[in-house]
Image (cartoon, rainbow, N blue to C red):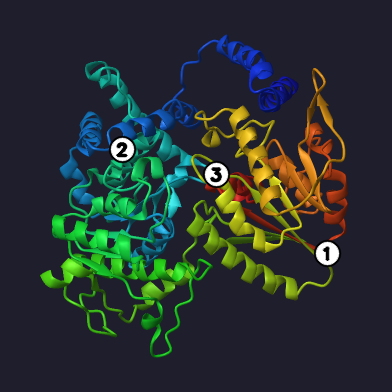
Amino acid sequence: MMARRLRFWESSLFAAFLFRQTGGRAAKSKTCYTIRRLSTQPARLPRMDYQDAICTLNTLQTNASFLEQVKRERGQPQMQLEAMRLFLQRVGLKVEDLDRLNIIHVTGTKGKGSTCAFAEKILRNYGLRTGFYSSPHLVQVRERIRINGQPISKELFTKYFWQVYNRLEKTKDAHYGTMPAYFRFLTLMAFHVFLQEKVDLAIIEVGIGGAYDCTNIIKTPWVCGVSSLGIDHTSILGDTIEKIAWQKGGIFKPGVPAFTVKQPEGPMRVLAERAQEIGCPLHVCPDLTPYECEGHRLPLGLAGVHQRSNASLALQICRSWLQHRGFYADFPSIEKMEQPTQALLNSRPAMATAFLPSSAMATGLRETEWPGRTQTLKHGPITYYLDGAHTTRSIQACVDWFRETAMLEEKTTVGSVVRVLLFNATGERDSPALLKLLVPCQFDCAVFCPNITEAVSSASADQHNYNVTVENMLTRCLDNQKSWCWLSEKEVVPRAELLLPGGLPLMTGTVHRGVESLVFPCIHSALRWITQGRDPVMDYSGKPSTLATMQPGAIAGARTLQEAAHIQVLVTGSLHLVGGVLKLLDPVLSQ
């Protein structure tokens, strides 16, 4: 069975590279053949266990077509929200039921997940039973739905998945056979789980945008937050930061307090206008420094200077929620709070007041964990720097964090230190723009691979993505490699050609005046080459990829990695890439 999987993978991989070399002609017949072969397998009825739940969930992965639908309906957001209301009714819930969740609703381009993580930990420290819905997941889809900071168990996921799915399945014939797409389904399931598990509050992270996002079915949250804004998902949200700000401000609700971090003038003006027209009191969070008066330092569990603004946003959100709930109605103010007068709202939002955080708040900020964001893992002579940054602003923040942290480590290391970049980007992300920001990190080697954990594995279905082909993923990696070569202004010196069936040449490795740049078919083969058997945690069983070992430059680069006293690996560009790496490096996340 394993041998058949390997042959199938290699045929798909060769098809991908043939697709690149021949413009799609040579690969087409091979790809069609493998699809026909798979389609002949007999259908298997679900057993309603966890893996069957995940496989059934994956049948709802119509994200690409769903996004196209969102684009078409941009001028009619009520169509999407009405569809979500109908799905909610089919599950047996009403929009008003969500008010029982005492919701905190958070949007933004960069930092919304970290803000939610800070807020969740703070409120849990008050003895509250918390629900937390976020996306995407890193290793297992259960990570998206958390109770008291922990992903729900496989047993609970399975139980609630089939409850929601079966209700939708039974009613679909009366609704033209419609089923919710992947993210919509998980949002419905999260609401169902939090209501059934009787959480004291639910922290809901927006998926994309705000106004049109399916989480915006929430009618009466207790407080809203907006993290740092930037350019992302332009085909859906608009091609300027002002248009994106309009979308994000769509989560504001009449009379519901909202807080935002400091934004550039243009988007801040748009947020203020949205708040005014909706009737939402909006305040701008101060920097974290004012909270730290009287010698009360606030160390953060998440690394990076940019996390300080996320922490301030979380503090304001939590204070507002706690005051609404009746917890500690008075927090000692450090500075006077601006009142949001009508004249002030016409020009800019009011400034929120800094206050002296409680011990529960300070402890929460210090103990917050949010894997895959400015995370460091030390495995013997190898240090992994993991950050799922995928926009220009977040990549710049990642670069600032990595350069500072890696330099400190390098100063205490005796012997040579080799820096390696492991990168991938997906969707409509501007890879050259992201890679350009990474050039100053002075990497000794750049490695590119798709977000496929292992070429041959029993494969966790949680990480399957059916919205993009292997051919497209590997073509994107080759394009990223080409962009890196150009941005690094390195002269490409070919060493040898790898001949594929039919005698077609394939150059998957290039040498740039001694600096290696390589493409690998999966994350596992990339990490095997980068670590050279030196990671005490990683599993090196099985043979390395034949295609990987035949790449020009791989042998010489391997020698450099073997001789280095220490290896620093920055993994960035995609949270899905970071998740695949963590699956291999942190076994706890896979359990």
Residue at 83% of width from left, 53% of height from top? 513
What's the CA distance linking mark 3 and mark 2?
A: 23 Å
Earlier in the chain: of badge 1 and badge 2, it is 2
Give coordinates of residue 315: x percent, y percent.
34, 70
Which residue is at the front of the view, 148 or 290?
290
Task: Look at label 2 and name its amino acid.
Answer: Leu
Q: Residues within 10 Å of mark 2 (few under 14, many from 20)?
A: many
Residue 167 location, quadrant: top left
Q: Is 537 on the left-hand or right-hand side of 177?
A: right
Give coordinates of residue 562: x percent, y percent.
86, 55
* Disc assigned to residue 576: 3
Q: Is 492 on the left-hand or right-hand side of 248?
A: right
What's the CA distance linking mark 1 and mark 2?
A: 50 Å
Residue at 22% of width from left, 79% of height from top? 337
Relative height, residue 490 to residue 44 (above, below): below
Q: Residues within 10 Å of mark 3 (few under 14, many from 20)?
A: many
Earlier in the chain: of badge 3 and badge 2, it is 2
Residue at 34% of width from left, 47% of height from top? 209
Of the two numbered discs 1 and 2 in the rendering, the one whose residue sits closer to the viewer: 1
Residue 402 location, quadrant: bottom right
Residue 341 visible? The answer is no
* Disc assigned to residue 565: 1
Which residue is at the front of the view, 77 or 10?
77
Give coordinates of residue 427: x percent, y percent.
50, 39
Residue at the extreme bottom: 294
Contact, mark 1 vs mark 3 (Cβ under 8 Å): no
Relative height, residue 2 to residue 148 (above, below): above
Give coordinates of residue 4: x percent, y percent.
72, 19
Report which residue position mark 2 lands on.
188
